[in-house]
Amino acid sequence: MRDLEAVLQECERKLEAIHIPFNKNVTVRAGKLNARTWGRYWIYKNMIVLDPVFTDDRMQTFATENVLMHELLHSCNDCISHSGLWKHYAQKVNRTYQYKIKRCSDYKPYMNEELLGEFMQRFKYVARCEGCGTYVTQVRISDFIRNMDQYRCSACKGKFKRIK
Ligand SMILES: [Zn+2]
Ligand SMILES: [Zn+2]
């Protein structure tokens, strides 16, 4: 089990070093979020909640740091949205420390096979791009699931194959 408090301290140390004014009262814990989010910053609670997969040792540490950095940047003034100042800070952190903080990230590639298999059990529908191997997960039936042949992967233009 990964110590989120220790990862938070590491992220804070890195942000302080490049003078990014985050909220120093933030605490972090793992908890249930809706299926589309990996993490969330609760401004009134001074709290970051991350999906429990990030406390799992079968998830790469890089991913836990990356998602925590993303949320920590939301704690800066005027950084609720993913544009403007938030984006500016994200680019600075990415340049300095080689993170990949962006508006929307996929952390499945950072899980090992076993964890990925457990993670997929949450979803009713799973498809995989035959080109680049990206997984698409859905909790409800959608046009994408019904008419998968008509869709192409946005990353590589590959076709999708339903695997669940
Ligand atoms: Zn965000
Ligand atoms: Zn693809």
Image (cartoon, rainbow, N blue to C red):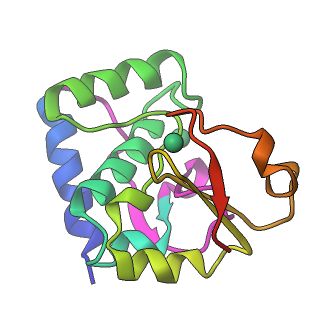
Q: Nearer the viewer, residue 39 or 76?
A: 39
Q: Is residue 142 left or right of residue 65?
A: right
- Return the x and y of residue 42 as percentages of the image width and height: 57, 53
Q: Nearer the viewer, residue 137 or 94?
A: 137
Q: Is residue 4 left or right of residue 142?
A: left
Q: Does the stretch in magenta take in 46?
A: yes
Q: Is residue 2 above or below residue 68?
A: below
Q: Is residue 19 above or below residue 29?
A: above
Residue drawn at x 86%, y 55% is 142
Residue drawn at x 52%, y 51% is 130
* Quadrant showing the N terminus: bottom left
Residue drawn at x 42%, y 33% is 76
- Return the x and y of residue 75 as percentages of the image width and height: 45, 40
- Report the magenta residues as a range: 19-47
Residue drawn at x 39%, y 62% is 27
Q: How many marks?
A: 0
Q: Is residue 32 left or right of residue 148?
A: left
In terms of image quadrants, where is residue 94?
top left
- Return the x and y of residue 32 as percentages of the image width and height: 60, 74
Q: Is residue 88 left or right of residue 49?
A: left
